[in-house]
Image (tube, helix red, strand yellow):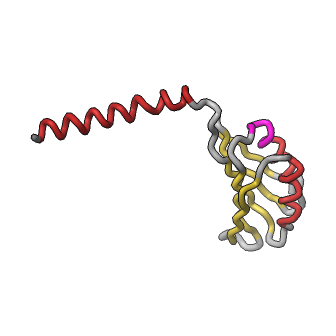
Amino acid sequence: MFLAAGSATLLALALLVLAKPLKAKMFPNRKEARRVRLIVERGTSLADLREKIEASEVPLERIVVRPSSVDQEDDAELMLGKGSREEELLSLMDGLRRISGVREVNSALANGSAQSKSKP
């Protein structure tokens, strides 16, 4: 009985391991939602951020702003819609770092990471 249970468990794990590459081949265009993290000065206009995102045509799902441990700074996390291309994301990051009050823009891309700091 223990042998049968152990064999069934190993078979199920093997199927899960084999299913992942198969899923990637069957659904190559599925992309995860992208996250962009910003460090902004307190009082930075969220309307300016939203306007820049809408101009880039990258779909925005939500903005979450949290107070930072550093005085006069906030952490803002942008959750962008699924399917946004890497070129669009890089263009958006470039535009965001030019907004007054944005100190840092950071995002994990599919093939590594991208980070951009504003000029002081």
> Front-most of 53 and 112?
53
In the picture, measured across the screen, residue 78 lies left or right of residue 52, that is left
Question: Is residue 35 on the magenta stretch?
Answer: no
Residue at the front extreme? 26
Residue 60's image quarter?
bottom right
Horizontal and vertical percent for residue 106? Answer: 71, 50
Number of marks in the rendered image:
0
| Quarter of the N terminus within the rendering | top left
| Quarter of the C terminus within the rendering | bottom right
Residue 10's image quarter?
top left
Q: Is residue 105 above or below residue 68?
A: above
Q: Residue at (58%, 31%) from the top-left corner?
A: 27
The main secondary structure of the magenta stretch is helix
Horizontal and vertical percent for residue 98? Answer: 89, 52
Q: Residue at (18%, 40%) from the top-left corner?
A: 5
Horizontal and vertical percent for residue 51? Answer: 88, 58
Horizontal and vertical percent for residue 111? Answer: 64, 34
Q: Residue at (65%, 47%) from the top-left corner?
A: 33
In the picture, measured across the screen, residue 96 lies left or right of residue 110, that is right
Q: Is residue 104 above or below residue 112?
A: below
From which residue to which does the magenta span run? 85-90
Q: Is residue 32 above or below residue 7?
A: below
> Front-most of 114 and 110?
110
Q: Residue at (80%, 71%) from the top-left corner?
A: 42
Residue 103's image quarter?
bottom right
> Front-most of 84 and 98?
84
> Front-most of 65 and 61?
61
